[in-house]
Image (cartoon, rainbow, N blue to C red):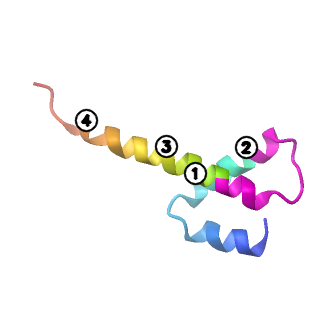
Amino acid sequence: MSDDTRHHADEHPHAARIRERAYLIWENDGRPDGHALAHWARAREEIEAEVAREQAEAPAKDKPAR
């Protein structure tokens, strides 16, 4: 991971999840060199979408059943 990518990674609130997803994407793509930023961007988009879904579903789970 480049220094620039690492800097952005440390600032994101879901950095650990994104880092893990980017690694899995990298492995699934055949471990190519020079694509860390693209893998990070794809992972960030996927994780942010997951977090948005989780947050949207959370209020429904917290409401008492009628």
Q: CA distance from mark 1 to mark 2?
A: 14 Å
Locate residue 30, reporting x and y percent. Answer: 87, 41
Judged from the image, the secondary structure of the residue bearing numbered disc 3 is: helix
Q: CA distance from mark 4 to mark 1?
A: 24 Å
Q: Residue at x 70, y 70 (%)?
A: 6
In primary-sequence order, the first of circles 4 and 1 is 1
Q: Which residue is mark 3?
A: 50
Judged from the image, the secondary structure of the residue bearing numbered disc 4 is: helix
In primary-sequence order, the first of circles 2 and 3 is 2
Q: Is residue 48 above or below residue 7?
A: above
In primary-sequence order, the first of circles 1 and 2 is 2
Q: Nearer the viewer, mark 4 or mark 1?
A: 1
Q: Which residue is mark 4?
A: 60
Mark 4 is on which residue type? Ala
Give the class, few, some or many, for how many residues have Cα within 10 Å of label 4's Cα (few <14, many ≥20): few
Q: Which residues are magenta?
A: 24-41
Q: Which residue is mark 2?
A: 24
Q: Residue at x 57, y 51 (%)?
A: 45
Labels 1 and 3 touching (C-beta < 8 A):
no
Q: Which residue is mark 1?
A: 45
Give the class, few, some or many, for how many residues have Cα within 10 Å of label 3's Cα (few <14, many ≥20): few
Mark 3 is on which residue type? Glu
Quadrant in the picture for the C terminus: top left
Mark 1 is on which residue type? Glu
Q: Is residue 29 above or below residue 42?
A: above
Q: CA distance from mark 4 to mark 3?
A: 16 Å
Q: CA distance from mark 2 to mark 4?
A: 31 Å
